[in-house]
Image (tube, rainbow, N blue to C red):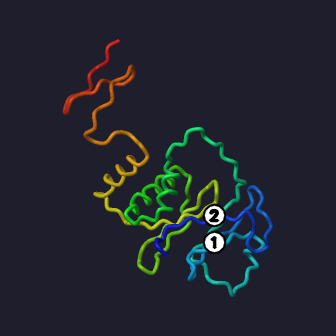
Amino acid sequence: MAQDWDIKPRDESCTGCQTPFVDEQSYFSALVFDAGGYKRADYCEKCWLVKDEEKVLPYSMWQGIYKVPTPEREEPLKKETAESLLRKLMEQEDPTKANVIYILAVMLERNRLLVERDLQTNDQGTLIRVYEHKKTGETFLIPDPRLRLDQLEVVQQEVIDMLGGPMKKGDAAPAAGNDTPAAAGPGQPPKPQGR
């Protein structure tokens, strides 16, 4: 396996009885690891309670509420979002982007789009955060790079740049508009606006 991060979609029906999930139904998810990598299985409550004792002990497990996915409206002009950037970087499997991937996942967790379901340590001692997407039910496996505070600013700036965000330090200040104070020089207070 090239990297630890991965996305596993939630099933639309129970792995045990193949009955489709209905809106607001409680479901149980289990993540197992075998020679082929991580595998996810989703169960209705009945199948979860009666599943065989002989099955492999899950790497991670959690309970969720199934929400029927709403079709997303196609935007005429696509813009990069934290979620689309996270997905793109995870697909690229570039180990140099591990810090950015982690920060994007934390941003999406703070925006309540991802929910942390579990925290595991793999065989190499890496912390793996198991997130579930609130709308789609997908599972995201994100290694925690254990960033130090002195590393955060650089990674945050990289994320902002990749999202096409506001200016970096040292860039020219934007022109003052009607409702924004005029730019001041270093160590000077903002210039007052006239009416």
Element type at mark 1: strand
Question: Residue reaching furthest bottom?
Answer: 54
Would you call the spot at circle 2 few (<14 residues within 10 Å), some (14-19), or many (20 or more)?
some
Location of mark 1 (residue) = 40
Task: Judge whether 35 appears above or below 171 on screen.
Answer: below
Quadrant that contains the C terminus: top left
2 and 1 marks in contact (CB < 8 Å): yes
x and y percentages locating residue 51 in the rendered image = 73, 80
Question: Which residue is found at the position 56% from the left and 64% from the top?
Answer: 7
* Residue kind at label 2, given as amino acid type: Pro
Instruction: Give the alpha-carbon distance from disc 2 to disc 1, as whole Å.
Output: 8 Å
Which quarter of the figure has residue 44?
A: bottom right
Q: Residue 105 location in percent, x, y?
A: 48, 57
Labelled disc at residue 9: 2
Counting from the top left corner in percent of width and height, residue 132 is at: 58, 61
**As shown in the figure, which amino acid type bears the numbered disc 1?**
Arg
Mark 1 packing: few (<14 Cα in 10 Å), some, or many (20+)? many
Q: Which residue: 60% across, 40% down?
A: 75
Q: Mark 2: which secondary structure?
A: loop
Q: Residue drawn at (50%, 56%), measured in percent from left and top? A: 88
